[in-house]
Amino acid sequence: MSSNEVSPQQRPAKVDYLRIATEEAFAPPDLFNMYRKLLADGKADTGFASLWGFHFSSQAPRVQHILKYNQDLDKLRIQHMDEAGIDMQVLSLTSPGVQAFDAETAVDYAITANDYLAEAIKKHPTRFVGLTAIAPQNPAAAAKEIERGATKLGLRGIIVNSHTHGEYLSDPKYWDIFAAAEAFDMPIYLHPSSPPPKMIEPFMEVGLDGAVYGFGVETGLSALRIMTSGVFDKFPKVQMILGHMGEALPYWAYRLDYMHRATVAANRYESLKPTKRKPSEYLRENFYVTNSGVAWELAIKFAQDFMGVDRVMYAMDYPYQHVVDEVIALDNMLMNAEDKKRFFQTNAERVFKITR
Ligand code: MN
């Protein structure tokens, strides 16, 4: 969809809440060239090569839209936001961000990307806030960048795109990242990435590795590993955010609690230790969910019922899912005015410390 396809009568109505979209992507000008080089050098993971190899060779309008608007943090994006009635975007470096690179490149480029983001926010302080990109490849450097994002750049959280070359934040070698997130009160948005090589084959052979399904189950696994590894027992104040209606985990909660307890009690796995709380308790006390990519009232209401109305936030997933009609559909949800305002505005203001 290009901007001139949005006619005035399709615009969302004026409402008495702000619409803050919380999972909105961008790419600095050189990121896609670095991705092209990674592909040319044969150094990309299977999933990355499949997705970005396609993006860089396709002329499909959706792909062209994604490539073009990821790279704009100025007039074009603001115009799209105005047309869609989006007051603010919470910006994050597009997936997989720096996690596609080797450690050294990733550490350097996270700094570059965060500086670039901070400049764009400085230019449009009433329209943008942003999350700190980090390189999990070097947890100590990532912790430093979290500190810099919080104290020097005015960023409001951390973006992590699930696994890094098949490794998960549940591994204690990454836990400096949680310590820094807790110390600087920065929520971690756990965003999808393509499944890692050991997981992706059965998805790819039927074309289901992408946002249609593979991203969601892989990211759900990533979040669940963090819960069952005891991260929140060690860092109880850490708050994480899951998009796409919590990557379905709220819907799983009953079975997760039952079978996690049963498996731990049966002593089946050395790697599955007891945790202080149940998966459902971590979900409700250490996670927020957004509806990125899911403009579906039924799912949003289920999440509000399960998580609590203070833990469900609006997201569009721009520029990947840029659909003005979805904003209108969500404005029209049958929901009391207070809860709708929590969903669109005040939860995000609280989580991302947005003051106006
Ligand atoms: Mn997204």
Image (cartoon, rainbow, N blue to C red):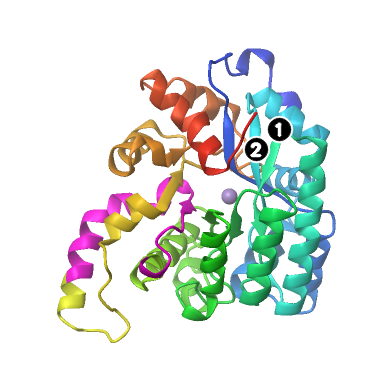
Q: Secondary structure at mark 2?
A: strand
Near-viewer residue (139 or 54) = 139
Question: Magenta residues: mostly which secondary structure?
Answer: helix
In the rendered image, is residue 30 in sight?
Answer: yes
Q: Is residue 64 part of the magenta span, yes or no?
A: no
Whether 31 is drawn above or below 168: the answer is: above
Near-viewer residue (310 or 258) = 310
Q: Horizontally, is 177 left or right of 263 in the view?
A: right
Do the residues under discs 1 and 2 have CB atoms within 8 angstroms?
yes
Whether 41 is drawn above or below 25: the answer is: below
| Residue 127, label in figure | 1
Residue type highlighted by circle 1: Arg
Whether 8 is drawn above or below 82: the answer is: above
> In this picture, which residue range is highlighted in magenta?
233-261
> Where residue 299 sits: x, y (%)?
36, 38
> Where residue 348 sits: x, y (%)?
53, 38
Q: Horizontally, is 140 left or right of 56 in the view?
A: left
Residue type highlighted by circle 2: Gln
Q: What's the residue at 60%, 56% (across, down)?
A: 158
Q: Is residue 255 part of the magenta span, yes or no?
A: yes
Residue at mark 1: C-beta within 8 A of ligand 1: no
